[in-house]
Image (cartoon, rainbow, N blue to C red):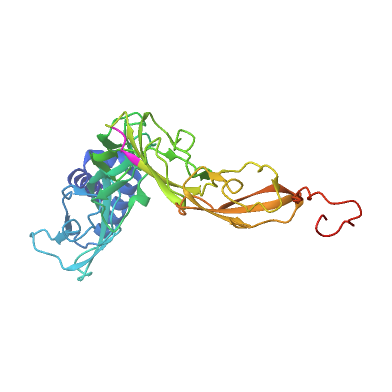
Amino acid sequence: MRFLRQMRLLSFLITETWFPAAFRVRFPVFLSVTLIAFLGFAAHGQEIPTINWSNPADITYGTPLSATQLNATATNTLAQIVPGTFTYTITDGTVLNVGVGQVLTVDFLPDDQVTYSGVNGTAVMINVTKVTLTVTADDASRVYGAANPTFTVSYSGFVNGETSAVIGTVPAATSAADGTTAVGTAPITASGGIDDNYDFTYFPGTLTITKATPTITWANPTDITYGTALSATQLNATASVVGTFAYTPVSGAVLNAGASQNLSVSFTPTDGANYNSAGAVVQITVNKATPTITWATPAAITYGTALSATQLNATASVAGTFAYTPVSGTVLNAGASQNLNVIFTPTDGTNYNTAGAVVQITVNKATPTVTWSNPASITYGTALGATQL
């Protein structure tokens, strides 16, 4: 009976001295097993070393367990160190998740197992607190009127080589700016991160909104002929926003003949705060003009009449020279509808084509003139001869 009372007293002392009340309530089975082990050793007459191990200070997530936390010692009744081996159930280098009152336990095996008994299941509790991540919204840019890009964030503060892949709910970056927000800057904010092991501190980024460039629509005009003045038919550019157009060359200009000549426009938007000025270039081909030849059909002439300016009298709508076939001074044989040709070479050969024309002339036969004076009187009996005929 005395032995049993001593064991009960020993059990009470161990329980009250080594284990906090919260631990006794939370881990009754573990406590019972530990006491049985202690009492078993005590029953054989060995001294039970005292395991000295205080609850470690709080650590932040990512701090691996080390001798700072796993620092139990064993002493005898004389407060002397008892050499031996400590085996921790959670080993050195382990990284614990965040949590309050996490249990660390140790088993002690003395080197001198004749004098001392082993002590199993000594426990302490440790608190692991969250580590703080710095989350910064990345800067971004877009042009006025466009949709916001996909915003991203950058992290600082991960431990143990971890990345954003471990975060339970990753933070998102957003901006209140939309397509109508004027040129300038707007904040990008990050928020919404949730994780068991990390807290979050957020820093904003900047969305830079730049001027948009209007879209100019202007097709290459169709070819025109020299002498055609430029007009809204050719100078007909349009823009995606309201504004004014300034053309070069200007409306009313007459271009020389030539292929692929540049027409340019400068566009000034009415909303100059949000839009850039813009420009465009198209090309136009100006074909040579063909002069107009005016040449009326000459009046009929009589054989023997030489061609002259009376018949060779073509005119042209521009300055130039005429080359006739047949040439001036030619006497045509009699005949109806004979061709007269002209080739006109314009002085301004850059802008005008060479031209030609044909008219027809009738040359009538000529009537010979018979000259015969009245013969002198003759006497009867005189035969007619060359004198009279």
Residue 229 is situated, as x and y percent measured from the top left of the image, at: 45, 37
Q: Vertically, is 147 above or below 39?
A: above
Q: Left or right of 51: which side holds 197?
A: right
Q: Residue at x 20, y 65 (%)?
A: 116
Q: Left or right of 374: which side holds 168?
A: left
Can residue 86 be seen in this snapshot? yes
Residue 264 is situated, as x and y percent measured from the top left of the image, at: 38, 44
- Residue at the far right in the pictured view: 381
Q: What secondary structure predominates along the stretch shown in magenta?
A: loop
Which is more toward the observer, 215 or 117? Answer: 215
Residue span colored magenta: 274-278
Q: Vertically, is 207 above or below 64?
A: above
Q: Quadrant of residue 187?
A: top left
Which is more toward the observer, 159 or 47? Answer: 159
Q: Quadrant of the C terminus?
A: bottom right
Q: Vertically, is 279 above or below 42?
A: above
Q: Is residue 367 magenta?
A: no
Q: Residue at x 39, y 31 (%)?
A: 241
Residue 263 is situated, as x and y percent measured from the top left of the image, at: 41, 44
Which is more toward the observer, 59 or 142? Answer: 142
